[in-house]
Image (cartoon, rainbow, N blue to C red):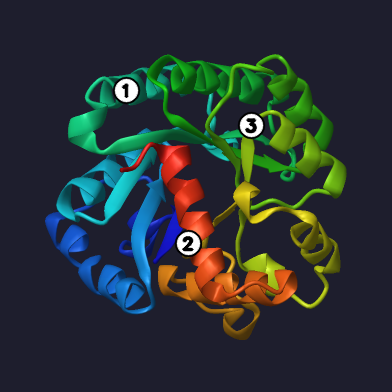
Amino acid sequence: MLTDTHCHINVMVKKSFDAPLTIAEIKSAAPIIHDAQKHGVTIIINVGTSAIESENCVALAREYPSLYATVGIHPNDCTATWQKDFAHIKKLVAQKEENKIVGIGECGIDRHYPGYDLQRQNDAFRAQIDLALEHNLGLVVHSRDAYDETLRTLEEYKGQIKKATMHCFSYDQAFADEAIAMGFFIGIDAPITYPKNDALRNVVKSLDLRHIVLETDAPFLPPQEFRGKQNHPKYLAIVAQCISELKKESVESVAQQTTKNAKLLFGLE
């Protein structure tokens, strides 16, 4: 049994971003979920990136028993009106059980693209950390080209964060150690299969399985053998196999421990 802790089926089933899912699009997710289940992926967490996409994640979670939702504002979607979007997200969280909301995010800091507003990203990041803590929900952190900035913000919450994941981990061993000390799981996805990613593979070799959760980030970041094509939650098995080989553990052990971690992270029975 595998758990995809970070997926965007809401993006996979439609052509335009930040548009509400239609009933037909919600129904069209069924084959994706079925294919994933055939490959052993029995739980999928769809991750929100904006107010509308968070709504879409909730809609999918309410339709399919194996799906759950997180709600949040991605740093690259953090506009000048982010507080209005955040108010809507808080309304969704107020009905978290009915909406099958198990986490907040993805939120964080992203300095990759020019024109970012670091202060705005930080303000939204802190607001979402506070919301996760208030509701005892898992925190999904996105950090890209923001090594120091991310750690600096998280240091403010040291000792408070108990359930969190560093999504699509791409930093070094020192960052991983810091994150784990703060209570984070390390999210590993298909970039671990990329030929030039020895640094990430070395970090994963050093980590205890108790600190790892599996992700696809589908439809983004497909495994090496599917580069240039849409990623899919069924490919999580490839990530598990790669970790199994790196750590000289059985695939079953990887699946069992990472699913146990995912259930702790998101409070799943």
Between residue 261 and residue 153, name the one nearer to us.
Answer: 261
Residue most extreme to the left: 23
Q: Which label was assigned to residue 88?
A: 1
Between residue 87 and residue 71, name the one nearer to us.
Answer: 71
Q: Is residue 221 left or right of residue 233?
A: right
Residue where numbered disc 3 is placed: 183
* Residue occupying the point 55% across, 74% down: 251
Q: Quadrant of residue 55?
A: top left
Q: Secondary structure at mark 3?
A: loop
Numbered disc in front, either 3 or 2: 2
Between residue 74 and residue 129, name the one nearer to us.
Answer: 129
Dot 2 or dot 1: first in sequence order is: 1
Q: Is residue 196 left or right of residue 219?
A: right
* Residue occupying the point 59% across, 75% down: 250
* Distance between the alpha carbons at the discs numbered 1 and 3: 28 Å
Seen in the picture, residue 187 relative to 98 is either above or below; the reply is below
Dot 3 or dot 2: first in sequence order is: 3
Residue where numbered disc 2 is placed: 256
Which quadrant would the C terminus be assigned to in this image? top left
Residue 222 in view in this figure: no
Dot 1 or dot 3: first in sequence order is: 1
Q: Residues within 10 Å of mark 3 (few under 14, many from 20)?
A: some
Numbered disc in front, either 2 or 1: 2
Q: Secondary structure at mark 1?
A: helix
Q: Could you tell me the amino acid type at mark 2?
A: Gln
Seen in the picture, residue 138 relative to 256 is either above or below; the reply is above
